[in-house]
Image (cartoon, rainbow, N blue to C red):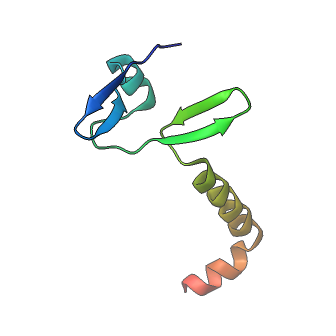
């Protein structure tokens, strides 16, 4: 766990992530992170969980309808 301090950034307030956290999340300056409420608090993630759910649904459909998609690709 990392303790983060809120800091003034212009008219906003932000968090500064330590370099090791950025490296672990594979993030760089300018990247977007997503905050998700969990039963334990808030999770910071480098990906959008809703998008991941949509991609999983797309993978399922592509697997199920492989022949149709193959014909459409011709």
Given residues 27 and 18, the one toward you in this image is: 18
Residue 33 to residue 5: above or below: below
Q: Residue at x 39, y 32 (%)?
A: 26
Q: Residue furthest right?
A: 64
Task: Report x, y in % for residue 59.
Answer: 67, 61
On screen, residue 15 versus residue 37, left or right, reads left
Residue 28 to residue 66: above or below: above
Given residues 24 and 43, the one toward you in this image is: 43
On screen, residue 42 versus residue 45, left or right, reads right
On screen, residue 30 versus residue 44, left or right, reads left
Q: Residue furthest left?
A: 10
Q: Quadrant of residue 71?
A: bottom right
Q: Quadrant of residue 70?
A: bottom right
Residue 17 to residue 73: above or below: above
Q: Residue at x 60, y 40 (%)?
A: 36
Task: Report x, y in % for residue 27.
Answer: 36, 35
Task: Report x, y in % for residue 66.
Answer: 70, 72
């Amino acid at each position: 766990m990392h303790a983060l301090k809120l800091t003034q950034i212009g008219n906003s307030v932000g968090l500064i992530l330590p370099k090791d956290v950025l490296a672990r999340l594979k993030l760089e300056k300018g990247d977007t992170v997503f905050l998700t409420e969990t039963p334990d608090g808030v999770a910071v993630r480098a990906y959008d969980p809703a998008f991941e759910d949509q991609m999983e649904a797309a993978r399922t459909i592509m697997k199920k309808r492989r022949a149709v998609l193959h014909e459409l690709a011709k």
